[in-house]
Amino acid sequence: MRSTILVALLLCAAPFATQAQVLPIGTVGNQNNNSYVYPEPFDNSLNVALPTQQTPMCRVEFLNSMGDIVMSQVLPWTPVVTINTSTLAQGSYTFRFYSEVQSLLINKQVKKRRNSVRR
């Protein structure tokens, strides 16, 4: 009985399995979205590299552990978007990167390390 159910499930899922896509960790979007967020952990800036420009502008958000937006910026889209994070306190954040038309492209947990003072 179990093997019959398993075979039936596999046959039903087969048409969808050919359309599956694998995305890099921390990304949401289409199959060509090979985005990178670096450095990790970050200090006073965070870089986002996206291979293809989708809109002239983009929006970035940092959410604290309570889900509150603690930083939000609209920036011009470039091959590598650099975000000034000097106002953020040390800790863990949810980082979200949106296209101008509000498509969520990246949703990733990131960590800001303590600011180092050089003398």
Image: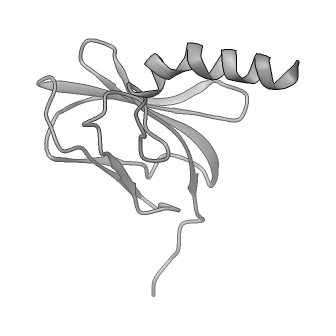
- Quadrant of the image containing the C terminus: bottom left
Quadrant of the rendered image containing residue 115: bottom right
Vertical arrangement, residue 8 with respect to residue 71, above or below: above
- Quadrant of the image containing the N terminus: top right
Q: Residue furthest bottom?
A: 119
Where is residue 96 drawn, in percent x and y? 45, 31
Task: Identify the image's colour scheme: rainbow, by chain, secondary structure or one colour.
Answer: one colour
Between 80 and 113, which is closer to the camera in this rendering? 80
Q: Is residue 50 left or right of residue 97?
A: left
Total number of numbered discs in the rendering:
0
Quadrant of the rendered image containing residue 18: top left
Where is residue 75 drawn, in percent x and y? 23, 32
Q: Is residue 4 left or right of residue 103?
A: right
Where is residue 89 drawn, in percent x and y? 59, 50
Where is residue 58 drawn, in percent x and y? 25, 27
Q: Residue at x 60, y 65 (%)?
A: 114
Vertical arrangement, residue 11 with respect to residue 75, above or below: above
Q: Residue at x 37, y 56 (%)?
A: 45
Between 14 and 73, which is closer to the camera in this rendering? 14
Quadrant of the rendered image containing residue 81: top left
